[in-house]
Amino acid sequence: MNEEIAAIAWQATSAVDHDRVQSRIAELARFGGRSDGGVARETLSSVDRAARRFLVEQARALGCDVAVDDCGNLFFRRPGTEALPPVLTGSHADTQPVGGKLDGAYGVIAGLEVIAALNDAGIRTRRPVEVVAWTNEEGCRFGPGAMGSSAFVGAADLTEYRKSTDGHGVTFGEALDEALAEMADVRRCPMGTPLSAYVELHIEQGPVLEQAGLPLGVVTGIQGVRWYRATCLGQASHAGTTPMERRADAIVAATGMVQRLNEAAAQVHPALRVTMGSWVVEPNSINTIAGKVVFTVDARCPDDAALDRFEEILNRTVTAWDWRGEATLDRFFCKAPTIFHASVLEVVAQACDEVSKQAGFDAAVRLSSGAFHDAMYMAQHCPSAMIFVPSIAGISHNAAEATAPEPLTLGVRALAHAVASLAL
Ligand code: HGY
Ligand code: MN
Ligand code: MN
């Protein structure tokens, strides 16, 4: 990086305002805020739509041009001096049903802070700088996850996504149309537009940075992820009158499968992580044998061949289970492991190392992400990379999710340095 760009990148870095970051995180957390300090802001819910409006107003107050695409992704653009493809940063504003203040939200707030810092420092960049708030990264209300970014890059068909339904039978299309109707004052923009680079700042959501005692991580890639739905159909029947040997108990079958899968996972690959996190039991009555159980399987591994091997075992375990009922399996999310681009990794690494050093720390940790992120699809569209800050006790997807104020600010400083370097 040439001297002049390096000097201007440092001006942007130094203009990041700690108190502004803290207060904006607290303001956004109020949308869906819970009494236990967590946040419940599932995608396109009324609180998520209110949060989107808050972000639009914040961006407009910073002088940004605001646009929304057909998947509800929000883009906040700070113009450059030349009509070039922008540098994009940002993350998602939706949360888990019981989420924290930082997962996703931190990256969107950080992007707005980078724009505020560029404004305060009076820096003109050649390229436009854009901040995005992706729709439905979590995928818990409407599966699969990362819907907004995958639709943006064309990796998936928005038409199909619109058919996804939540637990109350509402389709993603219905919820999306309602949210878009509330954004009638926001310019509609096309999807898949050219981008120069994408850098996402996110909390690690795991224990690595905290164990290393370092505030910043350069994220080299993201492990593979697959989601499945297993449907076990037995026979609902009376708990008192039905002899044990005549039952088709969907809970007994499903829990037997889960035990078998947990044992098998350990044999497939030491880094394979399997979670059966979402269950529906029907009729869910104390004195009726369960006639139907639907459970999900979330499988993650850096090694795609291991995910293939596990998928074979999963398919066989579910569909050939020895019981009086029957079971089916469908896969509705599959993303191979992601490796980020050397060109952007180099810029991000320099930013993280310099900001860490200036704050009195060793060079940033290099690590791969256990969680998936919108950056996994963005890496199919343009050179992309990520920056992590630590999660206290490695906890996330939990109301207790937290990161100390200093690393939060250092993360934004590193992002400002990287984005300015890429946009100048
Ligand atoms: O599930 C994930 O990895 C992400 O946090 N949504
Ligand atoms: Mn996230
Ligand atoms: Mn998450």
Image (spheres, rainbow, N blue to C red):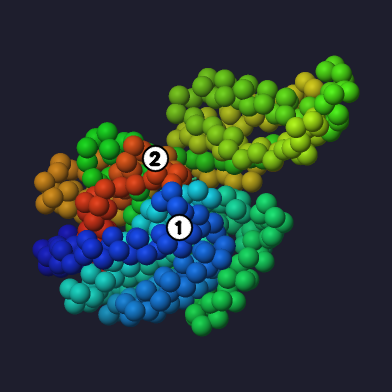
Q: Write the residue at 14% across / 44% down.
A: 361
State whether residue 260 is above or below residue 86: above
Marks 2/1 in contact by CB < 8 Å: the verdict is: no
Identity of the amino acid at label 2?
Answer: Ile
Image spot of residue 377 (x, y percent): 48, 54
Q: How many marks?
A: 2
Instruction: Classify residue 257 by image quadrant.
Output: top right
Q: Position of residue 372 (x, y in %)?
A: 46, 46
Q: Secondary structure at mark 2?
A: loop
Name the residue carrying label 1.
33
Which mark is on residue 92?
none
Residue at 27% across, 38% down: 210
Can you give x and y, in whole percent of width and height, for residue 382 in the image? 41, 59
User: For this rendering, which residue is in front, 114 or 4?
Assistant: 114
Q: What is the CA distance from the residue labelled 2 to the residue labelled 1?
A: 18 Å
Q: Name the residue furthest top.
A: 245
Pinpoint residue 98: horizontal percent, then vertical percent.
Answer: 50, 48
Query: Which residue is most to the bottom?
Result: 185
Looking at the picture, tell me which residue is in the foreground, 94 or 151.
94
Q: Secondary structure at mark 1?
A: loop
Residue 383 visible at all: no
Q: Which residue is mark 2?
A: 395
Q: Residues within 10 Å of mark 1 (few under 14, many from 20)?
A: many
User: Quick check: 103 above or below 134?
Assistant: above
Q: For the point 33% across and 68% down, which residue is it?
A: 112
Work out whether mark 2 precedes mark 1 in sequence or the reverse, and give the earlier one: 1
**Residue 142 in sight from this viewpoint:** yes
Looking at the image, the residue that sits furthest to the front is 35
Query: Dividing the image into 4 quarters, which one contains the C terminus?
Result: bottom left
Q: Nearer the viewer, residue 403 or 288?
A: 288
Q: Name the residue: 63% across, 65% down.
A: 175
Figure quadrant of residue 283: top right
